[in-house]
Amino acid sequence: MISAQAWADAQRLWNFQQMGHELRPCSVAIGLGSHDLGVADKTADLYHQGMMPLIVFTGATSRTTRNRMPRGEAEHYRERAMELGVPADVILVEPRARNTGENIRFSRALLKQHQVVVSSALLVSKPYEERRAYATARKLWPEVEWVSASTTLTLADYIDSIGDARLVIDMLVGAQQRLMIYPQQGFMIEQHIPDDVAAAHDRLVSHGFTSRLAPGGSWDAEARA
């Protein structure tokens, strides 16, 4: 049973992760691999809107996806986008990345290999990881202007699509924790964490929503100031 307070705290984290960027045409779209084929769906939709001429799908497999996506997240994304009418020749596949940092670094190397000049990029992620993905991309490829995008869903609708409320809240908590601790480790740019968001994260951790926390991670309360 998930309490009303936990639902409210999860909603607060969900809202904070949304960057609210105005979508516009960019040099390329980079779709970040995960369990969620909605990333491929959103990328295909953006392509059909004329938002970019080229797509990179990036991702190997993880404990969450190895059974559902045995050919790799990026390859399954490519297949899904093609089913939705995206031409094969506008899709590049990066099949090795196993975390967000590798998604960005390996995609950058692949685009360089193909001699693609990138000044701006649509960064397509799961809805609850927009801010985390953006902070990572800004750190690792600061020359690019990043525009965040994800499927437009409410938290309730996203949970319905996944079918596991506790897992979604665990993933929200994990994404929020990384926003707090990874800048100190050089993985992301620093971002201000509002007090109410930090408090929501802390309450959810105290109530056991911890399965997606980074091992050994901690959150220094002084960073809230």
Image (cartoon, helix red, strand yellow):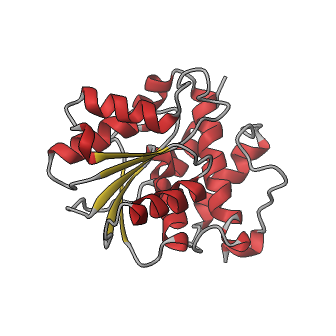
The residue sitting at 44% across, 45% down in the picture is 127
Q: Residue at x 57, y 73 (%)?
A: 189
Give x and y (percent) for residue 139. 55, 73
* Rendered position, 61 above or below 90: above
* Quadrant assignment, res 207: top right
Q: Is residue 171 left or right of residue 45?
A: right
Report the front residue among 115 and 176.
115
Quarter of the picture containing the N terminus is top right
- 88 left or right of 35 in image: left
Q: Is residue 196 left or right of residue 186?
A: left
Query: In this figure, what is the number of numbered marks?
Result: 0
The quarter of the picture where residue 113 lies is bottom left
Q: Is residue 4 visible?
A: no
When the figure is inspected, residue 219 is found, relative to residue 165, above or below; the finding is below
Figure quadrant of the C terminus: bottom right
Q: Position of residue 63 (x, y in %)?
A: 68, 31
Please name the residue shown 45% across and 43% down the image.
Answer: 126
> Residue 191: x percent and y percent?
56, 72
Please give the name of the residue rendered at 57% of the width and 23% of the height, measured from the top-left corner. 164
Residue 220 sits above or below residue 92 on the image: below
Q: Depth check: 24 or 89 in front?
A: 89
Q: Position of residue 22 (x, y in %)?
A: 25, 62
Position above or below: 4 against 219:
above
Residue 40 visible here: yes
